[in-house]
């Protein structure tokens, strides 16, 4: 097994352990029973596969593109997500939020699979729109007893860690086996996004 493959297996295993320890046994976006404030914010992005896949994909795509995307994406996404969260908390509507989130998984997975090199402003705009939707969903789902600021800090920190995980995985592109493993991962993420879209349409 190559160095890149071992790295991906190790990272994937660690992520799985985190999810098993952190995720509640039921619904993707539920924060009931998780407590309020910072703890709920930290755990919230980990409990929804759509959020998790999109945020890790942002890091992978940034690593594929290299500088400045590798640091710009993980900065822009949490900032726009925090803006979306404020909109959600104060009740500003965002039409089809869940559809946008599902679409983000498909699009970001496809970007990873293709290692798509778009103009930086186009790529950043895509990241920004999807981040706004993810943040809005977090804000709307703020637990009643939670401190809004602590909750926002928590999910921004968790998002940054997921981006960092994606960057570590994305660096595996330097090795031939890692290159193809990331292509396959992107395809699987995009397929998961298609399922999320289908589920939204059928609901």
Image: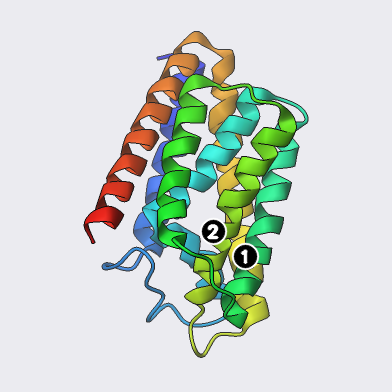
Seen as rendered, the residue at the extreme bottom is 145
- Residue 12: give its label: none
Q: In which quarter of the image is residue 172?
A: top right
The answer to whether mark 2 and mark 1 are in CB contact below 8 A is yes
The x, y position of residue 129, in whole percent, is 60, 50
Q: In which quarter of the image is the N terminus?
A: top left
Q: Name the residue under label 1.
A: 84
In this view, the residue in front, 82 or 172, is 82
Mark 1, secondary structure of its residue: helix
Query: Which residue is drawn at the image coordinates 39% and 67% (left, top)?
Result: 29
Q: Quadrant of the C terminus?
A: bottom left
| Left or right: 71, with 126 as reference point | right
Of labels 2 and 1, earlier in sequence is 1
Q: In which quarter of the image is residue 195?
A: top left
The x, y position of residue 56, in whole percent, is 52, 42
Query: Which residue is drawn at the image coordinates 46% and 53% (left, top)?
Result: 100
Q: How many labels does the image show?
A: 2
The x, y position of residue 117, in whole percent, is 63, 21
Query: Which residue is drawn at the image coordinates 32% and 35% (left, top)?
Result: 191
Q: Mark 2 points at which residue?
A: 133
Assess disc 2: are there few (<14), some (14-19) or many (≥20) residues with their C-alpha within 10 Å of its C-alpha: many
Seen as rendered, the residue at the extreme right is 68
Mark 2, secondary structure of its residue: helix
């Amino acid at each position: 097994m190559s160095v890149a493959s071992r790295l991906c297996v190790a990272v994937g295993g660690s992520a799985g352990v985190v999810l098993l320890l952190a995720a509640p046994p039921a619904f993707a976006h539920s924060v009931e029973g998780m407590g309020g404030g910072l703890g709920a914010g930290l755990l919230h992005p980990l409990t929804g596969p759509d959020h998790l896949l999109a945020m890790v994909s942002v890091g992978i795509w940034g690593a594929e593109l290299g500088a400045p995307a590798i640091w710009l994406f993980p900065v822009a996404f949490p900032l726009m997500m925090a803006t979306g969260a404020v909109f959600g908390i104060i009740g500003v509507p965002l039409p089809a939020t869940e559809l946008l989130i599902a679409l983000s998984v498909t699009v970001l997975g496809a970007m990873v699979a293709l290692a798509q090199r778009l103009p930086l402003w186009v790529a950043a705009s895509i990241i920004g729109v999807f981040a706004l939707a993810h943040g809005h969903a977090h804000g709307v789902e703020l637990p009643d007893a939670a401190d809004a600021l602590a909750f926002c800090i928590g999910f921004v920190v968790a998002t940054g860690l997921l981006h960092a995980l994606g960057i570590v995985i994305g660096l595996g592109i330097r090795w031939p086996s890692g290159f193809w493993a990331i292509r396959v991962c992107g395809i699987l993420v995009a397929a998961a996004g298609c399922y999320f879209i289908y589920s939204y349409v059928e609901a």
